[in-house]
Image: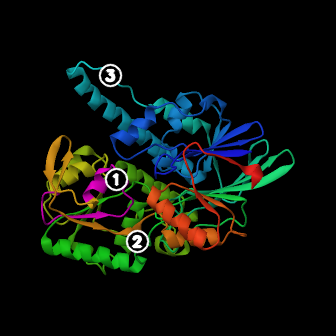
Amino acid sequence: MELEFYGAAGQVTGSCHILRVGGSTILLDCGLIQGGRKAEAANVEPFPFDPREVDAVVLSHAHIDHSGRLPLLVKRGFRGDIHAQNATKAIAAILLADSADLEASQVRRENRRRREQHKALLEPLYDSEHVADVLEQMIGHRYDKTISVAPGVTLCFRDAGHIMGSAVVELALTEGGDSRMLVFSGDLGQYDTPILRDPVSPERADLVLMESTYGDRRHRDRQNSLEEFAQVLEQAKKDHGNVLIPAFAVGRSQEVLYHLGKNYDAWGLEGWHVFLDSPLAIEASEIYWEFKHLYDEEAGAVFQGEYSMPALPNLHLTRSTEESRVIERLKGGAIIIAGSGMCNGGRILHHLKANLSRRETHLVFTGYQPQGTLGRRLIDGATTVRIHGDEVSVRADIHTIGGLSAHGDQADLLRWYRAIEGSPPVYLVHGDIDAAEQLRRTLKEQGSIAHLALPERRIDLMRL
């Protein structure tokens, strides 16, 4: 009975851990590695295990850094079941299809350059057929339902409060008469965030595998964050500029729309045009409305059972490329929500190219930006960036509103962990080394046994 770390160990993306119990092999997540060309080159490398020997996958949630290599796993021979929460299955369908399209587009663009240089051509990591295979193998489950995954392995999903369908994974393990409870946090959301319910802590665990994305910091108070957001919009109105919001299609886009709708009058939004410039985010929003039974009480009261977007009379849903290009011509008065959230692809790049060099532009980040991404370079103060082969000057006003992040901060992570009986030992994943180390020290100071997960380190669960 052992656990081994293969991804998101010492870094944020590429979540992937393997569990061996008796004769069964279970994979926890199979995410894409993100963060620039050097990091992403690792995606094409062989898995450090044989996909054909994996009996089942347990998926914590649909974000690509947790699900994005599932089609590659299937392509390379995995034929088992993929277990996910029902909403995760619905969201994974659109995110993985989009990932395959993006991969194909990037490879076509790179191969045009390679043909000119007489270099060997590349092939995509996977295609839409592999995505279809993943969805065929994926089984959706409700929260709080116990499921048999393999002999000696039962699973229960609890709400993680990160995005719709995100789950804390509880695995009850039995081998040779011994039993252990392994808990994998997946990604944990903030407490008291709108739309989603608070993260659920399991009652007990023998070992906890916990994320540490913001393990070294506290987010700004949510109300203060909303006031800061309102101030950005007010200043942008005075500057007669546009507001660009790079947002993840699932989670951030829906929350930003929620806040804009709820504060439409208070923030004086009647003079703005709000664009959700992402077919993917539009699809994801429709799934959010479909799963209204997973809302918290506040969101349920706001939507009042209606199958619709929040009340934003000036909201424009721009699905087509032609509609998106029209937005690029606007010099002011537009709030543009577009992907990708890390600025490493998608329509936001076109809007950045058109607006970054203008001093009246306001760029608002609401989510984590890994090292190596364009978003991180902009936050770190780059004065010029390269977009679509062109150098673009950065004169825009850049804001980071951490209080709107989908990830819990250190206080949220500690609150979730402290509710588990007996303060079980912890291994920290899904965090940069500095963030994970700060959280480890804090846990240790509070009397807990905490370790950093290291790549390919094996933990003997029988010795716990």
Disc 2 residue type?
Gly
Point out residue 296 in the picture as x, y percentages from the top left corner: 55, 71
- Span of residues in magenta: 356-378
Residue at image mark 3: 121
Task: Please check the rendered image and state whether residue 372 is part of the magenta-colored stretch, yes or no.
Answer: yes
In space, the residues marked 1 and 2 are separated at their CA atoms by 17 Å
Quarter occupied by residue 455 = top right
- Who is closer to the viewer here, 280 or 301? 280
Residue at image mark 2: 403
Mark 2 Cα shell of 10 Å, populated few (<14), some (14-19), many (≥20): many
SS class, disc 3: loop
At a point 37% along the width and 35% down the height, the residue shown is 103
At a point 40% along the width and 71% down the height, the residue shown is 403
Q: Earlier in the sequence, mark 1 or mark 2?
A: 1
Residue at image mark 1: 342
Using the image, tell me which numbered label, if any, was put on residue 451. Answer: none
Disc 3 residue type?
Leu
Q: Which quadrant of the figure contains the N terminus?
A: top right
SS class, disc 2: helix
Q: Earlier in the sequence, mark 2 or mark 3?
A: 3
